Image (cartoon, rainbow, N blue to C red):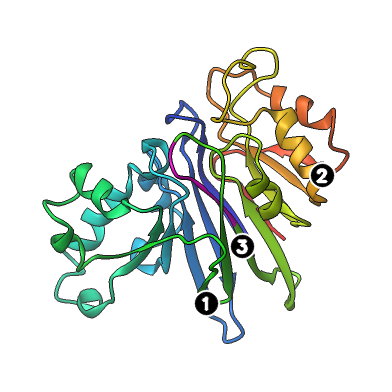
Amino acid sequence: MRVTVVGCSGSFAGPRSAASCYLVQADDGEGRTWNVVLDLGSGAFGPLQAVVDPFDLDAVLLSHLHPDHVADITGLYVYRRYHPSRSGGVHTTQAPLAVWGPAGTCDRTVAMGASDSARELSGTFAFATWSPGTPVVIGPLRIEPFQVNHPVPAYAMRISGPSEAGPTRAVVLTYSGDTDLCAGLRQAAADADVLLCEAAFVEGRDDGIEGLHLTGMRAGTVARDAGVARLLLTHIPPWNDRGIAVREARAVFGGPVAEVEAGQVVAF
């Protein structure tokens, strides 16, 4: 399994990165590469095209419906619906792309102006709703959604798939989405090889805001308590001092920890 960081800026696109978007890829036993996108936030569809053909996506998995995690699904719709060199060609009969998300994802996509109706969207996207405790299988990837603590319905994702070291070894990636501390995140992260975890807040600065985001220290606490092997911090707003989330996390977590950067590829 490998993850390309398409966008990692917290809450809005920043000067060095688009908002949240991560391409997860895994190869099956027959040599096919499966491509799944975790979130498609503001500004992310542009750099996504540099790393994968949008027609080669197998699914889009949305953690929640805030714009910094879903806004660029409108661009993906236009690309797959109207691309002039693909219409009338091999992709004409391609099945609608699976889009998994919270309840209301289709309506939110319509409201953002992707199309005039859910019926019009249906030829391009096939929407499905997360159900905690019910895993979704996409090629060699198994995705388990866990409800987490955010002002809108939101989900962390536990993704199991083949290791880059060999297809017979399974590895686990946990993506926090946006959340404060909660049991759902701890369950999703249990013994994960990689925890890709938001750390938008700063200890001492944002202490009065609950149920919204993690700090680096809170992310480190989850990683420590869940037995995570490696912690990767993301969703850090441009106004935060670079490195502060890592310093906070290292105060409580003894394993490897780093902030991700746009364009980075993590294979494990």
Residue 14 is situated, as x and y percent measured from the top left of the image, at 46, 27
Q: Nearer the viewer, residue 54 or 153?
A: 153
- Residue 239 lies, with reference to residue 213, above or below; the image says above
Count of labels in the image:
3
- Residue 73 lies, with reference to residue 13, above or below; the image says below
| Residue at the spot of label 2 | 225
Q: Secondary structure at mark 3?
A: strand
* Spatial CA span between label 2 and label 3: 19 Å
| Residue 113 numbered tag | none
* Spatial CA span between label 2 and label 1: 31 Å
Left or right relative to 163: residue 238: left
| Residue 139 numbered tag | 1
Residue sitting at x 70%, y 18%: 203
Left or right relative to 66: residue 245: right
**Label 2 or label 1, whichever comes before in sequence order:** 1
| Residue at the spot of label 3 | 159
- Is residue 82 at all visible to an observer of this figure? no
Q: Nearer the viewer, residue 166 or 72?
A: 72
